Image (cartoon, grey):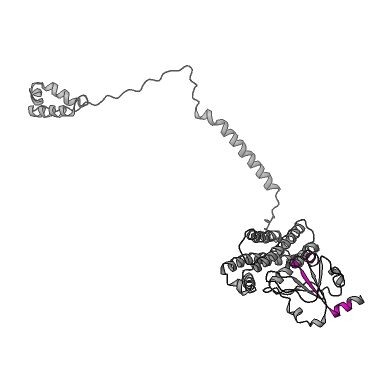
Amino acid sequence: MSSSSDSFLQKTTEELQYLVQHPELYHAALVAEAGRELRRRGATLPRPATAEPVAAPAPVYDAYAEPTPSPLIRWWPAGLIAAAVAGLAWWGLRDSTASTPAAVKPATNAPIVLESVKTSRMPDFEVETARQVANTRRQLPAQDRTDTTATGRYARTARRYWLAENAAAYLTAQAQGDSASNLFPNQVDLALERISWFMKARAYDQHLHPVMEARLNEMEQGMLLRRSSLQTLRTQYSVGAEVTESKEAFTQAAEAEDISRGIQGLPSRKEPIAGNLASLGGAAKAEPTQDYKVVKTLPAPHHNQNPLYVLDGNLLPSDAMTGEAPQAIRAISPDSIGRIVVLKKQQAVQAFGPRAHDGAVIVFTKAALRNSSRD
């Protein structure tokens, strides 16, 4: 079998030149071999033939095609409209310039004056609350304080109470002094949230000692009074009424404040009712009934009960730790005491409010009874 070079030897020079002249028709190796054979023969290598330019197709006439408008015909309406608008604008500007006085000064912008709004930011009461919680813990019996788990739970719940109580007392003072700001409704909502925070803690049995439970019951009664009072004040403020005239709300707030003072071991701030013994339900002269019990000596204290003591109309809380009568009553000579009446819980609450939820012990001195008989 002959090689490719032998086959090129058999071809004529014209055939080889045709291969070199038309490389697009043959393999590159064949074209290169043909070129080498032509050089060996001493023949001239022809240049590759260039492709003839393809003539553009002649335009075809379409009888249904839309004629293409010239640029002048297409844009002359827009130019006419633009010229008309420009002319009208120039005419209007010329008339306004002619009618405007020459000496017109530009108006000066007056400074913006912001209307002052009375606001009062409510304190957070954290420092005061910490002091009150520590004082509340110290008033627990020493034996109860040794139970650190129960004492810790009690202190955490008491903290919720004091945060709510301090906020409610602050807002009540704002309303009484007619100094409530525009933030008053929102601040009341915040205080009500704190009250709800305390109430949620009371929904669980925390396994506390009886004295702790008694104190928390007093706190709960105070919060109920505060909630009702604040809701009334907020409603009065929202409708534009005078909050200083909310007597019922302020009465409830005074009851709640009296409870908080009793929890701290402080005397009541209620107005003395000495000389008005009829407000005690006639206890100074009434015969013993199922609601009254006349005794000769002060009742023995109970560690889980804290009755309210009333000395000649002055309200005094019992000892927060032992439930004993206050020192002002224990210091009175037995010969100076004319009558001791014990009120049961329901009757005591009706006479003195929630502070007397454990009953009341009313002590009349002989001097007070003599003044009452003259009245």
Q: Is residue 284 left or right of residue 119?
A: right
Magenta run includes residue 239: no
Q: Determine if residue 178 is in view.
A: no
For the C terminus, give its image quadrant.
bottom right
Residue at x 53% of width, y 29% of height: 74
The span shown in magenta is 347-371
> Foreground: 374 or 157?
374
**Residue nearer the viewer, 76 or 226:** 226
**333 or 182, nearer to the observer:** 333
Asked if 260 appears above or below 22 in the picture, the reply is: below
Residue 176 horizontal side relative to residue 79, left or right: right
- The percent coordinates of residue 296 (x first, y second) are 80, 76
Q: Please provide percent x and percent y for residue 250.
A: 77, 65
Q: Position of residue 195 (x, y in %)?
A: 67, 61
Judge whether 371 appears above or below 183 on screen. Answer: below
Residue 30, quarter of picture: top left
Is residue 358 one of those drawn in magenta? yes
Which residue is located at x 8 percent, y 21 percent? 10
Horizontally, residue 189 falls left or right of residue 58, namely right
Main secondary structure of the magenta stretch? helix
Q: Position of residue 56 (x, y in %)?
A: 35, 23
Locate residue 169: give its quadrant.
bottom right
Is residue 219 at all visible to an observer of this figure?
yes
Q: Quadrant of the N terminus?
A: top left
Instruction: Describe residue 86's horizontal placement relative to residue 52 as left or right.
Output: right
Q: Foreground: 78 or 2?
A: 2
Which quarter of the picture shows residue 290? bottom right
> Furthest-top residue in view?
63
